[in-house]
Image (cartoon, rainbow, N blue to C red):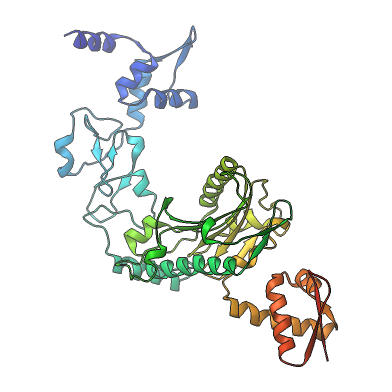
Amino acid sequence: MEESIDKESRDLKPFLSLKEMAQYLGMGYKAVWRLVLSGELPASKVGGIYRIRRNDAEAFLEQRKVARKVPERQLDNLDEKPFAGLYLGRAGINCSRCLRLIKTPEMVGGECQHPGCDAILCRSCWASENDRYCLEHKPSANIKLSEAQRRLNLGEISVIVTADQAYMREREFISRFDQHLGHHKSIRSPVDGSKIRVSSWESIHEECADGDKVTMRSDKHKVPAKTYPLNCWSVYHVGRQKGRGGFVIAAYAYSHLNTFDEDGFDTEPASRGELSWLLQNLLQQARDNHCLYIVGIGSPTGWDKDALKSISGETDERGFSDLNLAPCLVDLQQNKVIFNPHDVRLKDFIHMYSGQTDEEALAKAVQLVREKLAEKDPITLKETAQTTGMDKDIIRKAFLQLEAGGDFTVVDMGKTDMAISRH
């Protein structure tokens, strides 16, 4: 009884407070406040309190009235009172794609694009420009893949990567990284340049997927039922004492898991916005652990141009630089590693993220040494590493392999250098 009296007295008032306006519109208080601040909803400020004329409130609704039919299957949940042209009901309605509850018109993205269907989609589902359909009219995976192939042939998209391909690229990327790192008995600290001996890489290793620890090593020889990417981590905590200090070197595979799970393929390179989110999380981890993070982030579909520029510093943009984080991007589609060339902390680690096997890297090093010797004879390990950017261990192996062939001589020049020349 008291509630009905309050409602009646409010309906007779010529002015409404923000709270009363929110109740009148069925919106949140903050949403009404933002409309007032933006000027979309006229209001007067008297004594520090906003007041909205009832006539302005009704005009506001009238201007935003949209003719919209609600699917019959959703009518059972509707109230009699319209809101901005869309009937939402007392408890709201559900998105016809993800079934998320839609409480306000601001949460509505649009209608199903199937001819004759007016089922409502939330803003999150509507964000996918190529798949704005309800569950009933959602295209099959084969139809989506055929459409993506057509767009690829027309040059509208640059890549199609299936879930199987993404899974294989992810596993190869992580395995290659583990293999490269495991060949080192010691590693130079990117923090102070000191040499750190590692007796067991396994003892400082941690492997995760989707942020949760998993024991994937025991399952490496099992064939999974579905080969979908997992967004795997491979993390090594080097020189850490009592949980702090030292540095972390890690490889992280990043895929659009929801897209692969729903469609079975992906056509979108990872974006700069996604990279910013990843870097923020990594920075927070590095600061919480009080150590430097060296991280290679691999994407099976590659990276867009803006993401690459933000890391490498091409054109007029500065490359990424931070005291606690030294990242590089790995394009697993084109087997490329992108990093800030001015970040010297990365120079000893870049080769660990490359798409080459050890045998391929050694063959390339042998060829480069031959070419350098054709220009200058003799050459040293240090200058070869500086001019080619290759890892010193790989160049040392190339020197020794050429010497074993009988046409070259290698001479030690102290503990850290050697020279090679033709006979």
Indicate the quadrant containing the C terminus: top left, top right, bottom left or bottom right.
bottom right
Q: How many marks?
A: 0
Compared to 181, does 311 lie above or below? above
Indicate the quadrant containing the N terminus: top left, top right, bottom left or bottom right.
top left
Determine the residue located farthest toward the front in the rendered image.
Answer: 199
Q: Residue at x 38, y 64 (%)?
A: 218
Residue 4 point in image, percent of width and height: 19, 11
Q: Nearer the viewer, residue 285 or 128?
A: 285
Residue 100 sits in which quadrant? top left
Q: Is residue 307 left or right of residue 232?
A: right
Q: Nearer the viewer, residue 84 or 370?
A: 370
Q: Is residue 383 left or right of residue 316?
A: right
Asked whether the viewer can see residue 314, the reply is no
Asked whether the viewer can see residue 8, the reply is yes
Compared to 174, does 408 lie above or below? below
Residue 412 point in image, percent of width and height: 81, 77
Q: Residue at x 39, y 17 (%)?
A: 18
Q: Is residue 356 left or right of residue 36?
A: right
Q: Nearer the viewer, residue 414 or 69?
A: 414
Residue 418 point in image, percent of width and height: 80, 76
Q: Is residue 99 left or right of residue 304?
A: left
Residue 363 point in image, percent of width and height: 64, 82
Q: Residue at x 52, y 47 (%)?
A: 277
